[in-house]
Amino acid sequence: MADSFNPPDIWQPFGAFAMMKIQGTGQIVHLKGQVALNKDGQIVGKKDMRAQLRKVLENIRTVLASVTDVISLTHYATDIEQFIAAGDIHKEFFAEPFPITTTVEVSRLYHPDLLIEISSMAEIPFERFKRP
């Protein structure tokens, strides 16, 4: 069984999407691709990969309450060189053992001002898991 949720403290997905899906008894959480939107759905850091990457990781932290349980990240970057140059920002959010990552360069995201989208998966220990 899987349940979908849209936490209130982050931008709300539009269309037929959910922000997160909890698999099984709640230990595995799949998070929708996050982009650099504030709570009102406005783009943060237009044309600034560093600002957008930071906002995306902040959004992931907001939805999950912590990034320590993130086990996997998939990055979709419109400019791989800018993304690599902003790589130090990940260390502001993650410590060893780091999550596994995959990075793909794409021609564009759903809005031309967006530069990075990250989907993630987390494994939250039962003793800390709280169903939304």
Image (cartoon, rainbow, N blue to C red):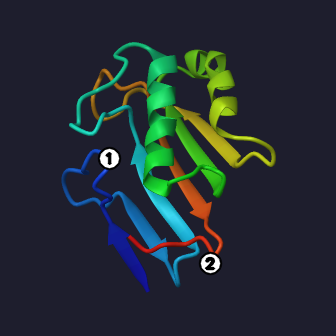
Q: Amino acid at mark 2?
A: Phe
Q: Answer whether labels 1 and 2 touch (C-beta < 8 Å).
A: no
Residue 28 at x, y percent in the picture: 57, 71
- Residue drawn 20% across and 50% down? 14
Quarter of the figure with the C terminus: bottom left
Question: Disc 1 versus disc 2: distance between alpha carbons?
Answer: 24 Å
Of residue 99 and residue 15, the one placed in the foreground of this image is 99
Does residue 80 lie above or below 32 as drawn?
Answer: above
Whether residue 89 is visible: yes
Quarter of the figure with the N terminus: bottom left
Residue 109 at x, y percent in the picture: 36, 32
119 left or right of 32 in image = right
Residue 66 at x, y percent in the picture: 57, 52
Q: Amino acid at mark 1?
A: Ile
Q: Secondary structure at mark 1?
A: loop
- Residue drawn 42% across and 68% down? 21
59 left or right of 12 in image = right
Name which quarter of the figure residue 71 lies in. Answer: bottom right
Residue 110 at x, y percent in the picture: 29, 35
44 left or right of 63 in image = left
- For the residue carrying disc 1, how many other residues have a C-alpha within 10 Å: few (<14), some (14-19), or many (20+)? some
Whether residue 117 is visible: no
Residue 126 — which label? Answer: 2
What residue did someone put label 1 on?
10
Identify the mark nearer the N-term, 1 or 2.
1
Name which quarter of the figure residue 92 lies in. Answer: top right
